[in-house]
Image: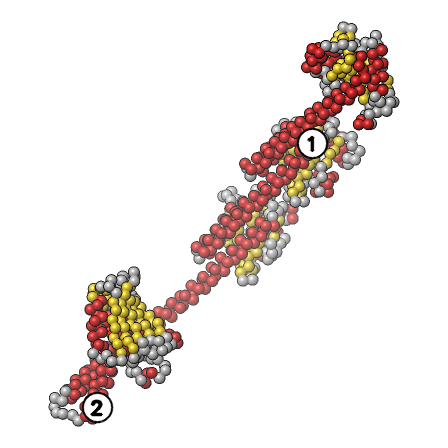
Amino acid sequence: MINILNCAQSQPVQKQNSDLILKLLIVEDVLADVELMVLALETAEIKFTYDAVDNLKDCEQLLHSKSYNAVLADYRLPQFTAYEVLELLQQSAQEIPLILVTGSLGEEAAVDCIKAGMTDYVLKERLFRLPMVLGRSLEEFALRRQQKAAIVRIQQQAQQQAIINRIVQAMRETLILDDVLKSSVDALHEALKPSRCFISQPDTQKEMWVNHVSTATINREDCIGVKCLIYPHYKEAFQQGKIIIINRNDPSVPLALHELVNQWNLNSVLIAPLVYQQTLLGGIILQQCDRDRVWTEDEISLLQAISGQCAIAIHQARIFHQLQQQTQWEKTLNQISRSLNSSLDPEYILQEIVRLTGECFGVDRVMIYALEHEQIKITREWRSSEDIASLIGYITPLSEWMASINFSPYQVFYAPHLEKICPPSPEVEIVKTVPHLTVLSVPIFIRDKFFGGLALHTITRVQEFTEEEINLVQRIADKAAIALYNAQSYELLEELVKKRTQELEAEKLLSDAANRAKSEFLSNMSHELRTPLTGILGFSSILIEEVFGELNAKQKQYIQGIQTCGKHLLELINDLLDLTKIEAGKEELILENIQVITVCQECLALFDKNQSSKLQLKFAIAPDVTTCVADHRRLKQILVNLLSNAFKFTEIGSVTLKVEQTEAAILFSVIDTGIGISAPDQAILFQPFQQLDSGLDRKYEGTGLGLALSRKLARLHGGDIIVKSQPGSGSCFTLILPHSLQTNELS
């Protein structure tokens, strides 16, 4: 039997493994063969130590108690073979080469050995090959281990990526933060298998509490809602996003934490802070209770990746919550604005304001109070339920109100825990009988004058308001101020309107009386003026016809002058009476279907006989113009007036009556080549008693009523008269007569 040997060699080593001392297990029953193997390795300058055994029992013991780099075994030994050594090696879980060192081995046997798992073989008669075979086998197994490690790393990375993908997918599928964080801790627990896995988050006071615990955590229910006492000791490190590892026997652990570690039976703790844009949002905590644990780089890397995703999820949830909140706030403000715009009833508007405010913030009571004669009076109120005591109509002196809750009504007052700063007061009934947990009150000013305030109360729970929420309540108070101001302004406006209405009614009575007097005057004057004019024109006609004897040239000239002046005066009176009748709304049109060409020819016939050789009268009518609906007499009157003006102001050239139609109207255009009209004169052209202010009124006679009367008659038909003209280039007056006639009364 060969005893176990342990011989350390100090020979030079191979260049590629200068710092490596191999540990070899030699399974051989012939001592001389062992020495030959050792000699072959020493000759190759390999550093090594070895153990030699000649039985399976010792071989098994060494393989389970020591680690080796390779096994050198004979093929056949007493009572066992190299196959049994291979089996023991495989059972030991050591992944090292087994090299056969045998006296003789056929090709077929060598192939079977390699297939069974043996790495290589060396014949004893050729032991000089042993260093080469050993080196090659070690390199092969090193490469195999590297490949296996790479596969393991790839699998771990794939597992990590799968977990991260699950979390990212959960983030995409839902905006509910609790669901995302719950999926995260469950996935992390499944991957790393700690004793406990949970996520903590800060409250409004920046204190950390356990909110989400993995399903597989031991004593899970005991962990939910527990305050995390570790964070204050590593606050700065967490703020910087650093990973913290705490071990039970680590002397660097603060003494204050030792009791906590023992209390929760913690052997190792790994904490990854949830930090987004330098803001601490919480942390992921892994605890190992059943054993000491060294957290690997891969595990820490996975935890960091998941903590980053969780931080993003928390940040996105906060943003989404803020957007939802802002949307709700804007909706509330819009509803209040709609109430302001839809009603002038202050009672309705203010009641809507307290209702919408209460529903928006989910409080128990919202009220508006007013300051009247140094007393606070609650004028409007909204309550979340009938069980909440009503304060509507409550009145208390301002001094007692301020003393009871120790605040000035002229500024914002916010007390999340009112009972801590204002104990119940026996002097003031409202404080004695109606306890409040949270109070938020903002003042209402109307045009810089204090009116009262808008107050929010919670009675069943404590509610904290953010700065943004307080600002929103102030904006709502401003809306209430607008409503109150509008109500006050509306009351004042009603009084002004009532007063003005009375004044207008009085003025209307005076105007009606004046119109009646004017109508009566015109009616009387029409008869009184026309009667003598008729006589003058009749007698002058008889004299001109020389019925009672011949007249000399001078007499005839004077009589014709009398007749011309009479006719001019009659036209003036007729135009004035027509204009007055239209303005009084007493002119009625007699509408009928009129042949357009007929009425045009009737008008042109009045001027054709007076046409001079220097002035041409032209007429153009479109083929599609046939009939129109109008008052025949008034249409003819308008066209004659326009033609008369054109002839009056045109000495050389032409006067054209052009008729065409559009989809909406028929256009009668009188176009001349006369003196034209300047832009300032066009502005006053259609005003009664206005003539061109260029000295022409001395050359061309006229009443100044023709164009004004014509436009009013056109508008009475539902149309109009427009003019286009330039000085020296003639004028174009166009009567627009609509197809669908709608008469208008114009004053």
Left or right of 363? Residue 37 is: right
Above or below 650: residue 476: above
Where does the image place residue 597, in percent across and percent down from the top left? 21, 68
Picture residue at 84% right of the left edge, 14% below the top: 36
Q: Label 2 is placed on what type of residue?
A: Tyr
Residue 283 coordinates in the image, percent (x, y) = 67, 37
Question: Disc 1 on helix, strand or loop?
Answer: helix
> Quick check: can you spot residue 639?
no
Crowding near the residue tagged with mark 1, few <14, some 14–19, many ≥20 C-alpha atoms within 10 Å: few
The structure residue drawn at horizontal position 54% and vertical position 62%, both measured from the top left corner, is 447
Which of these two is toward me, 198 or 559? 559
Q: Amino acid at mark 1?
A: Asp
User: As drawn, which residue projects farthest toward the left?
Assistant: 548
Rendered position, 506 above or below 99? below
Q: Position of residue 391 (x, y in %)?
A: 52, 49
Seen from the viewer's position, the closer of residues 547 and 30 is 30
Quadrant in which the C terminus appears: bottom left
The single residue placed furthest to the top in the displayed view is 79
- Residue 733 in picture, x, y percent from top left: 31, 72
* Residue at image mark 2: 558
Q: Earlier in the sequence, mark 1 or mark 2?
A: 1
Label number found at residue 298: 1
Label 2 SS: helix
**Left or right: 120 as drawn, with respect to 485:** right
Furthest residue toward right: 10
Residue in view at x 22 percent, y 74 percent? 604
Between 153 and 737, the one nearer to me in the picture: 153
Q: CA distance from mark 1 to mark 2?
A: 130 Å
In which quadrant of the rendered view does residue 576 lie?
bottom left
Inspect this view and state whether residue 276 appears: yes
